[in-house]
């Protein structure tokens, strides 16, 4: 069975990090499994634990009164769920729910923030990588906002 | 430039604002011989002509098939036509998807919204000669699950060896598929691991962004084709309304290689 830092080295978010950095990050993580329908993150709650998806799919949702869960994005293997753990006030902005049985790595956010504070190079690398994820997801969200399929003015 | 009458033989509602019509020449069961990606100028009841891509099977010329989204007066009239009613048809016009040129390659078709309709003939052509291609992948995005077209076809194509990935911009809890923009499917489909040619059809914003994302995964501009859309009126290269740079979309398109078209799409005034 491979060590967690070996797994992390192959994940796009963490690839390119030094072995010592991967070991530090792995030290805050542990493998876990959840069943379909499990709520991993709940809007407004403390961002104590974030996840790397190894297998399965997670839906990001917003709860709307009278409409239930509105699904705005799905994430799959090798993707990280949650970035609010890295930015104050460290509270989740969305719900995250397992759409199917998932194998995950659960990371203790306070543990990793502490290590990033002690080792600023690690902190910088984490910021760069999570910022890249943020940029990609922000661009995608902007295009979703354009509603290009439904907006006749944007269909040319 | 007078359209020939074609009679609506059957009609099916696909989504809240989209219908598929099957037409044939009056007194016969003949449709139209066409190449995948071509379009006709279609008109109903004097409301004006509109360019509509043919969405049928190019190997079956017994019916002319059009999938039409009702967005204005002319398309509303076409969508409102009932079996037995005649529509005026001119064409087919335009350059086709290069299904022969892509032989020997993996092929990814990227469709957004109603854009799956112009790609459907190409998909059928690829499946008719399945052994001539490597991996066949369809990435298809729509606004919401109820706006996905051709659900039966998607299942059939998957069974015949097309890797079908669908996504929607948003959904309720009943949808268990992907949610997110179509470019998020590219990595999941493993496009970087093959030698792909690509065919894209959908809103121009979607095609621009998707072409860039495919290029990032190694798809060459010369092997990437898009179906452009501009205000086509005559369909035969005379009126100039569809001019795009030095080309006329009705004559030199609608299918272009990304290498040829890209620089003109970057000129915002066009």
Image (spheres, coloured by chain):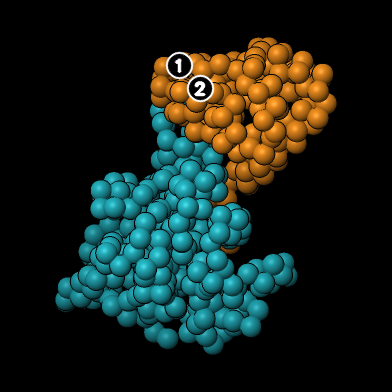
Chain colours: A orange, B cyan
Residue that mark 2 sits on? A104
Asked whether, in this view, residue A5 is left or right of residue B148, the answer is right
Q: Is residue A135 above or below residue A95?
A: below
Which residue is denoted by mark 1 in the rendering? A34
Residue B115: x and y in percent read 46, 58
- The picture places residue B16, in percent across and down from the top left corner, at 41, 46
Q: Residues within 10 Å of mark 2 (few under 14, many from 20)?
A: many
Q: Secondary structure at mark 1?
A: strand
Place residue B25 in its image quadrant.
bottom left
> Closer to the camera, A92 or B106?
B106
Residue B255 visible here: yes
Residue B69: x %, y % from top left: 44, 56
In the image shown, does A34 or B50 lie closer to the viewer? A34
Quarter of the image with the N terminus of chain B is bottom left
Q: Secondary structure at mark 2?
A: strand
Question: Eyeballing the image, is A52 above or below A108?
Answer: below
């Amino acid at each position: 069975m491979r060590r967690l830092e070996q797994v992390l080295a192959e994940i796009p978010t963490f690839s390119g990090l030094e072995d010592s950095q991967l070991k530090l990050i792995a030290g805050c993580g542990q493998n876990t499994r959840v069943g379909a329908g499990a709520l991993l993150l709940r809007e407004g709650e403390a961002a104590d634990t974030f996840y790397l998806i190894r297998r399965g799919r997670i839906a990001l949702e917003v709860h709307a009164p009278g409409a239930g869960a509105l699904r705005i994005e799905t994430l799959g293997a090798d993707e990280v769920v949650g970035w609010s753990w890295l930015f104050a006030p460290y509270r989740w902005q969305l719900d995250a729910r397992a759409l199917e049985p998932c194998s995950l790595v659960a990371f203790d956010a306070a543990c990793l923030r502490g290590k990033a504070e002690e080792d600023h190079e690690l902190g910088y690398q984490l910021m760069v990588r999570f910022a890249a994820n943020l940029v990609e997801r922000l661009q995608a969200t902007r295009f979703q906002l354009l509603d290009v399929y439904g907006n006749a003015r944007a269909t040319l | 430039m007078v359209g020939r009458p074609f009679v609506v033989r059957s009609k099916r509602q696909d989504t809240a604002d989209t219908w598929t019509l099957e037409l044939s020449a009056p007194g016969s069961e003949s449709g139209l011989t066409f190449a995948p990606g071509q379009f006709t100028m279609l008109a109903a009841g004097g409301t004006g002509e509109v360019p509509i891509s043919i969405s049928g099977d190019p190997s079956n010329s017994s019916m002319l098939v059009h999938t039409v989204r009702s967005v204005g007066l002319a398309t509303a009239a076409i969508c409102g036509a009932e079996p037995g009613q005649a529509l005026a048809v001119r064409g087919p016009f335009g350059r086709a998807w290069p299904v022969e040129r892509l032989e020997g390659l993996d092929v990814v078709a990227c469709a957004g919204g109603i854009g799956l309709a112009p790609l459907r003939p190409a998909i059928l052509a690829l499946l008719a000669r399945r052994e001539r291609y490597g991996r066949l992948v369809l990435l298809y995005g729509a606004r919401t699950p109820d706006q996905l077209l051709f659900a039966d076809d998607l299942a059939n194509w998957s069974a015949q060896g097309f890797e079908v990935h669908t996504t929607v911009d948003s959904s309720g809890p009943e949808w268990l598929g992907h949610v997110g923009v179509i470019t998020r499917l590219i990595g999941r489909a493993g496009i970087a691991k093959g030698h792909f040619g690509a065919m894209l059809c959908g809103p121009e914003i979607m095609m621009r962004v998707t072409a860039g994302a495919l290029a990032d995964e190694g798809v060459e501009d010369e092997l990437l084709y898009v179906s452009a859309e501009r205000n086509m009126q005559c369909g035969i290269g005379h009126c100039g309304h569809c001019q795009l740079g030095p080309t006329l979309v009705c004559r030199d398109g609608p299918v272009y290689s990304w290498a040829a078209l890209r620089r003109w799409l970057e000129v915002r005034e066009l």
